[in-house]
């Protein structure tokens, strides 16, 4: 629900050069993937449940709390985490063993379909055997992580043709390379590839759906990108606890569940995010992320502005300490969004409790506060203490000031 930008950005896309605009669109697509697909909503709900159980652990603690926290989750949540982990697949950008992911396209990628038993569910697993240009080989699990990055990169290249991500074929160019090697009838149509990536995120087994839909589109090249999407939405069924649901009904159910989980976990009324969710329901017949491109017209800055005007820009921040929270309503810019402001604070607190910061044990919001000349000594080691700030407010919600906290580097 946030967009990180390396360069300075004040919210005005008119002033951006093409490479920076392409980067922002790449990150904005990730935002839309998270709020406008069943996979994104389910993954987010699991994350908010993890946050809620972590907070409960702190509140109920009667002995010293050691940071970073590593707790056991409830069986129900652990099962959901396992489902997400299976569907997420391999994350190359988190793999520190390799710094060059250029794929040897002369070596055919082998696709394997397997199945994994998880409690009472049988989950499909798609694995790939990949050869890299340095001569090494690796077997990876395809999942939402790579699919999302490939889709966002393809979208980015509609704006900036130079954004080829040459050293990082994995994850950014993988779907394109798979199509070129296995599904040649559609490989040159990036709009179709984007659409199929998006379709796959309407499932909790995105890798299987991606391969199936690539094969179907390849066998039916006369179907347009939007026809492929509409056919999937209208004909596909989702099986939940033995009950078959249409994709639209499944998505509507997830939206309602997401709103409840979000409000309970973040402890505020949902405003900006709620309005976005209502606008992107597929049942309404308007799919912004595809409508923008499926007429095959150039993706101009004006079109991008139309998309952002319709759905708004979520919380964005830069490495320089700039941040731009959204208004509470897409039609009223006079008041900042309560749900996004709360989410910023919760994300900072949860990150501090569960992970070491790359610059030492410092509050994740420190760079923003420092730029506003309102940082404090307590930003290091105990940011919930000292003068009032976002972290003191968040810390009070879980009564962390009353606990004995020990940091273990």
Image (tube, helix red, strand yellow):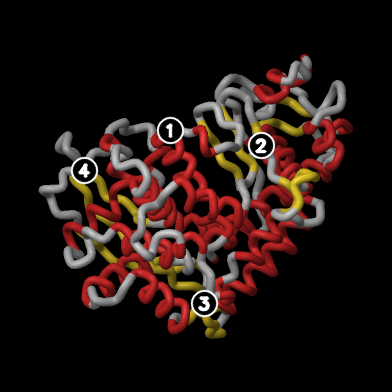
Mark 2 touches mark 4? (CB < 8 Å)? no
Q: Mark 2 highlights which residue?
A: 324
- Is 350 above or below relative to 176? above
Q: Earlier in the sequence, mark 4 or mark 1?
A: 1
Q: Which structural element holds mark 4? A: loop
Q: Earlier in the sequence, mark 4 or mark 3?
A: 4
Q: Mark 1 highlights which residue?
A: 17
Q: Is residue 175 left or right of residue 204?
A: left
Q: Nearer the viewer, residue 151 or 347?
A: 151
What whole-number distance in Å separates the C-alpha atoms at marks 4 and 3?
A: 35 Å
Q: Is residue 386 left or right of residue 315?
A: right
Q: Residue at x 60, y 28 (%)?
A: 356
Q: Residues within 10 Å of mark 1 (few under 14, many from 20)?
A: few
Q: Residue at x 63, y 46 (%)?
A: 314
What whole-number distance in Å separates the C-alpha atoms at marks 2 and 1?
A: 19 Å
Q: Which structural element holds mark 2? A: strand
Q: Earlier in the sequence, mark 3 or mark 2?
A: 3
Q: Residues within 10 Å of mark 3 (few under 14, many from 20)?
A: many
Q: Which structural element holds mark 3? A: helix
Q: Position of residue 210 (x, y in %)?
A: 35, 65
Q: Mark 3 highlights which residue?
A: 247
Q: Earlier in the sequence, mark 3 or mark 1?
A: 1
């Amino acid at each position: 629900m946030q967009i990180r930008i390396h360069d300075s950005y004040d919210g005005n896309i008119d002033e951006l050069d093409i490479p920076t605009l392409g980067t922002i669109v790449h990150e904005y697509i990730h935002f839309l993937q998270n709020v406008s697909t069943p996979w994104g909503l389910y993954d987010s709900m699991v994350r908010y449940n993890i946050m809620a159980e972590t907070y409960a652990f702190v509140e109920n603690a009667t002995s010293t709390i050691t940071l970073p926290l590593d707790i056991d989750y409830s069986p129900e949540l652990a099962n959901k985490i396992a489902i997400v982990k299976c569907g997420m697949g391999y994350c190359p950008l988190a793999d520190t063993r390799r710094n060059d992911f250029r794929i040897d396209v002369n070596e055919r990628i082998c696709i394997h379909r397997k199945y994994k038993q998880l409690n009472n569910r049988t989950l499909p697993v798609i694995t790939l055997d990949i050869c890299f240009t340095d001569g090494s080989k690796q077997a990876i699990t395809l999942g939402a992580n790579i699919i999302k990055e490939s889709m966002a990169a393809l979208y980015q290249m509609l704006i900036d043709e130079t954004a080829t991500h040459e050293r990082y074929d994995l994850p950014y160019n993988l779907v394109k390379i798979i199509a070129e090697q296995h599904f040649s009838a559609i490989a040159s149509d990036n709009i179709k590839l984007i659409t199929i990536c998006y379709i796959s995120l309407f499932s909790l087994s995105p890798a299987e759906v991606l391969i199936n839909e690539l094969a179907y589109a390849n066998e039916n090249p006369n179907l347009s990108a939007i026809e492929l999407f509409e056919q999937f939405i209208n004909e596909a069924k989702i099986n939940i606890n033995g009950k078959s649901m249409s994709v639209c009904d499944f998505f509507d159910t997830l939206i309602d569940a997401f709103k409840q989980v979000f409000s309970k976990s973040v402890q505020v009324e949902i405003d900006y995010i709620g309005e976005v969710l209502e606008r992107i329901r597929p049942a309404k017949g308007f799919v912004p992320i595809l409508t923008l491109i499926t007429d095959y017209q150039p993706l101009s800055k004006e079109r991008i502005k139309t998309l952002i005007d319709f759905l708004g820009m979520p919380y964005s921040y830069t490495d320089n300490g700039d941040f731009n929270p959204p208004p509470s309503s897409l039609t009223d810019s006079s008041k900042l969004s309560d749900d996004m402001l709360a989410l910023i604070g919760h994300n900072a607190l949860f990150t501090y409790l569960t992970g070491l910061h790359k610059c030492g044990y410092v509050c994740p919001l420190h760079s923003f506060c420092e730029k506003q000349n309102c940082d404090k000594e307590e930003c290091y080691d105990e940011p919930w203490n000292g003068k009032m700030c976002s972290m003191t407010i968040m810390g009070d919600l879980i009564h962390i000031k009353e606990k004995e906290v020990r940091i273990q580097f």
